[in-house]
Image (cartoon, rainbow, N blue to C red):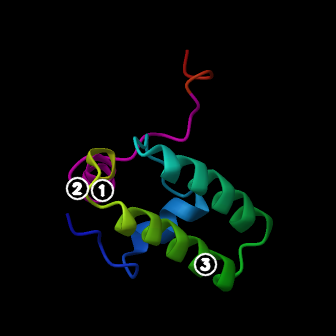
Amino acid sequence: MRVPSKDDPLWVDIVTGRKTFRLKFLAAKILLGRVMRTVSASPTPENIEDAVNQLHAMYDKNAASPSVKEDINLIFGEEKPCSKISSASAR
């Protein structure tokens, strides 16, 4: 599977928290939590670019994984992002 280019604006939307998805790939979930905290604390262009680079590299390195394929299809495919409302507050 081909991971979309780092230039795709969706990567920035993900690391800044503008769009959220229910990811399947555990390593990406963990990494994303960390980079989102960094970007939230200091949303400089450099921090955002570094976060995108890290997340993209994680997906690219593991592109053959079924959960990575699901995530890439979810993010860049036809499916829509989930709302930012947490599951606890949606009950």
- Neighbor class of circle 1 (other Cα within 10 Å; few <14, some 14-19, many 20+) is many
Q: Cβ–Cβ below 8 Å for labels 2 and 3?
A: no
Q: Which residue occupies 28% across, 60% down?
A: 76
Q: Quadrant of the N terminus?
A: bottom left
Which residue corresponds to mark 1? 72
Q: Residue at x 57, y 55 (%)?
A: 32
For image coordinates 39% across by 47% down, the residue present is 81
- Look at mark 2 in the image and give the residue it sits on: 77
Residue at x 48% of width, y 54% of height = 19
Residue 51 locus on image (x, y percent): 59, 71
Boundaries of the magenta span: 69-86
The residue that disc 3 covers is: 50
Side of 35 where 73 appears, left or right = left
Front residue of this view, candidates 3 and 17? 3
Queried whether the magenta region covers residue 80, the answer comes back as: yes
Quadrant where the C terminus is found in the figure:
top right
